[in-house]
Image (cartoon, rainbow, N blue to C red):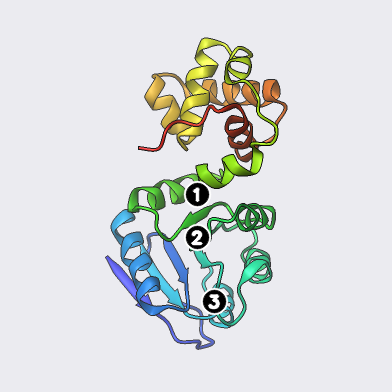
Amino acid sequence: MEIRVRPAEREPVRVGQGQTFLVVDDHPLVRHGFALSVSEIRPGATVIEAGSLAEALDLVARTAELTLVLFDLNLGDRGGPDGVRLMVEALGERPLLVISESDEVADIVDSVRLGARGYILKTSSTQVLEHAISLALTGETFLPLPRTVLSGTVAAEPVRAGGLLDRLTDRQRDVFQLLLAGQSNKEIARELGVLEGTVKVHVRAIMQKLGVRNRTQVAVVAARSGCLPEAG
């Protein structure tokens, strides 16, 4: 495991042959904790750290092989939506995951709309972080909408759970439940013993039947319908 803290020098950042992650947070202990967690999740990866938006943007510009960025939403010098937007623009196709103490739906939705590949609460477990990274690196979005907040937001328009599930075939219901559990297409395929391509077909069919375009909207429809699984 390798954790490197880089100063804002102008030379290109030289990293190893494996993946390279950047953790951006202005609280050193929190930042280092996430760096350690990433190193445990991705053995052999290089993890670099930044304590400000300026330092983070500099590191992004100088790290050609950057794999993924974990970015604190409430960064002291320039956080919030503006900071997320600037980082996403600087990263291009490279994924960014927002980390935050806030479970406000507005913060979650704004972050994803700005291009973040997911939103991780700082109270989340290492398993959640691992799952979010895996999804982001496969081009998907991790969005653990907090059940209590989400339910309160959409409760004004309740939808009968049975009515929603009646639209789906038995296999689509299986895929639907695993989607709500946050599993990737590959993980769903492994769980159900089918090809990943088959899962993609089911996911597209589910979205069409529910009238949504992405996994985020699937979660919202599920919350309205009372279909979210009980928290463990």
* First in sequence: mark 1 vs mark 2: 2
**Residue at disc 2, secondary structure:** strand
**For the residues bearing labels 3 and 2, Cβ distance under 8 angstroms:** no
How far apart marks 3 and 2 lie (CA) works out to 12 Å
Between the C-alphas of marks 3 and 1, the distance is 20 Å
Q: Secondary structure at mark 1?
A: helix
Mark 3–mark 1 contact, CB under 8 Å?
Answer: no
Per the image, the residue denoted by label 1 is 137
- Is residue 198 or residue 100 the one in the foreground? 100
Q: What's the residue type where badge 2 is placed?
A: Leu
Say if 117 sits above or below 52 in the image: above
Q: Position of residue 91 (x, y in %)?
A: 61, 64
Residue for badge 2: 68
Residue kind at label 3, given as amino acid type: Ala
Quadrant in the picture for the N terminus: bottom left
Residue at 52 percent of width and 44 percent of height: 148
Characterize the local packing of mark 3: few (<14), some (14-19) or many (20 or more) Cα atoms within 10 angstroms. many
Quarter holding the C terminus? top left
For residue 188, say whether it is visible. yes
User: At x 70% / y 23%, what residue is drawn?
Assistant: 208
Residue at 53 percent of width and 81 percent of height: 52
Circle 1 crowding by C-alpha within 10 Å: few under 14, some 14–19, many from 20? some
Looking at marks 3 and 1 on the same chain, the residue that comes earlier in the sequence is marked by 3
Q: Are marks 1 and 2 in contact (CB under 8 Å)?
A: yes
Mark 3 lies on a secondary structure that is helix
Query: Can you give x and y, in whole percent of width and height, for residue 207 in the image?
Result: 66, 27
Q: Nearer the viewer, residue 232 or 140?
A: 232
Residue of label 3: 56
